[in-house]
Amino acid sequence: MLIRLLLLYFLIHYFEPGHAQYIHNVSIPDKSLSKVAEMTDSSVRYASGISPSTLRDHLKVIASDSMEGRETGKRGMYLASEYLQKQIRNLGLLPVPGTNNYFQNIAFTFSKWNDTNIQVNELTFRHLWDYITIPEDNQDLPEFSASEVVFLGFGIDDPTYSDYKKIDVKDKLILINKGEPVKKNGNSVITGTPEMSSWSSDLKRKLIVAKSNGVKLVLIIEDDIKKLLDTNRRKILLGSTELGIASQKTYNTANHIYISSNIAKAIIGENEKKILSARDKFKSGKPAQVVLKTSFKVNMAKDVSILEGQNVVGYIQGKTKPDEFIIVSAHYDHLGIRGGEIYNGANDNGSGTVTLIELAQASQQAVMEGNPPRRSIVFLWFCGEEKGLLGSQYYSENPVFPLKNTILDINIDMLGRPDQKYKDDPDYTYIIGSDRLSTDLHKINEEANQKYTNLTLDYTYNDEADPNRYYYRSDHYNFARKGIPAIFFFNGTNEDYHRTTDDVEKINFDAMANVGKLIFHTLWEVANRKERIIVDGEIK
């Protein structure tokens, strides 16, 4: 027995965790450590409850046709939220404080264009082809017409340069360029240097100024309508969903439309020389306005409806630090029914949804055995992610538990399918955000992997230069932007992403369970360590 104990001591102290080898943003684990952990750590037993078969059982329900694609505000979302409430109630998680249920109710406004078109001098122009306007950014403006359009340069009102000088544009229609005036030597008129001012990068600033000057509608000349459509395709084609009730919303920006050069030419008509003369004045640092007589008509009538959503919240109270909270999150909504077809979203994000159920089960097992965590753990399922991270945004602005006492968010999205890079080696996960705000967090996750799970940890998408910018595109970011450390577990995209073919039959439950175990061990370490993790990074 003494020899065995000495050997065990040697193994534990010789193979110090946390020394992973890095090759091209990938952490390669030392696989000699997990057997030691299995002999010495009861958390291994709790994590073992995260089983492929149980994950499959839950996902067969969550991603079934009966859930109708779980679209926020629709029947399927309510069915899914009731299923989640039933599971965590049966586990014994605590409900939202002051209630006997597990819901955080949210009001959303859904809006889309009922009918929109533009006519200039009897020429009709088509939405999405000749111009673009986004429902949530504009107030209802049915059948607006004008007999003149004021060309107002760049729409800037700055102490060094103002397009609004000596002109009244109250209730008028104005036409503006993007950017700012630049002198012949290439210097900005405003900064006096080659570096452009914020007027070039912040279009909203121009729209705020237009609103404050009483402008009725701003036409913005857009060189690449197609690119703008690609960037905003979902909210334009499928409508926009935003937090709150639109009738109670205060707009601080003027109504605005992005127009093609074709519409601009139709408006300018025979006044091209006047516009060219105005542009020459811009280069000398002088503003110039041109009043263009024209017949302009636009219809911006919206269909607006109020939707109700639900975040699902259950928690375990900490034993010695109950007022410190760790959030473990996943969004449970998906795309719903479109064109008569159901988008079941088994991977996106049925996989994260059911992994979170299993994490709650594993944590609650420890509680039932008399080993509750030091800190409180909040299990949080968000709606509205597919509408623009709205459920997590709402929670971050209306927290059930104080954000100042929230020390971490662990977020899970799309764990069920390997991407092309790992199609032959599915025991991996992408780690995003772990070192952005807390080097402690990064180290804890690395050590948990070395000690327990031996997965390949890929940091490719954590690179600030990565064009996918996933760090800013999932629910964890609404915590990170508040200064709360966050770590995002993600397995990448595949050919079925946002398609009707994202079904249960294609899920790799064994690999999914393995990532779930790593998440549990990282969670359990943060929940039970003596000191809260240190925040030593900057919000970006």
Image (spheres, rainbow, N blue to C red):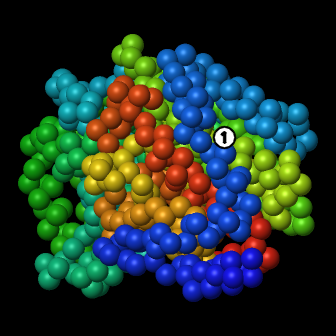
- Residue at 60 percent of width and 19 percent of height: 75
Quadrant in which the N terminus is drawn: bottom right
Front-most of residues 58 and 119: 58
Left or right of residue 28, residue 50 in this image: right
Residue 448 place in picture, x, y as percent: 59, 68
- Which residue corresponds to the image point at 35% horizontal and 27% vertical from the top-left? 501
Numbered circles on residues, count: 1
Depth check: give the residue in front, 440 or 202: 440
In the image, residue 234 above or below residue 28: above
Instruction: Determine which quarter of the picture holds residue 239.
Output: top left
Q: Residues within 10 Å of mark 1 (few under 14, many from 20)?
A: many
Horizontal arrangement in the rendering, residue 466 relative to residue 343 (left or right) = left
Instruction: Between residue 405 and residue 230, name the one nearer to us.
Output: 405
Q: Is 183 above or below relative to 45?
A: below
Q: In which quarter of the image is residue 520?
A: bottom right
Residue found at the very far top of the displayed protein: 340
Q: Percent x, y for residue 539?
A: 55, 72
Q: Name the residue under label 1.
A: 357
Evaluate whether residue 61 shows in this view. Answer: yes
Q: Is residue 96 visible?
A: no
Q: Which amino acid does label 1 sit on?
A: Ile
Image location of residue 288, percent across then percent down = 25, 62
Specify the quadrant of the image occupied by residue 14. bottom right
Which residue appears at 17% of the width and 79% of the height? 186
From the top left corner, tell me how far across and down residue 43 is, in percent: 71, 60
SS at badge 1: helix
Residue 454 lies, with reference to residue 95, above or below; the image says below
Q: Which residue is drawn at 39% across and 43% down?
A: 417
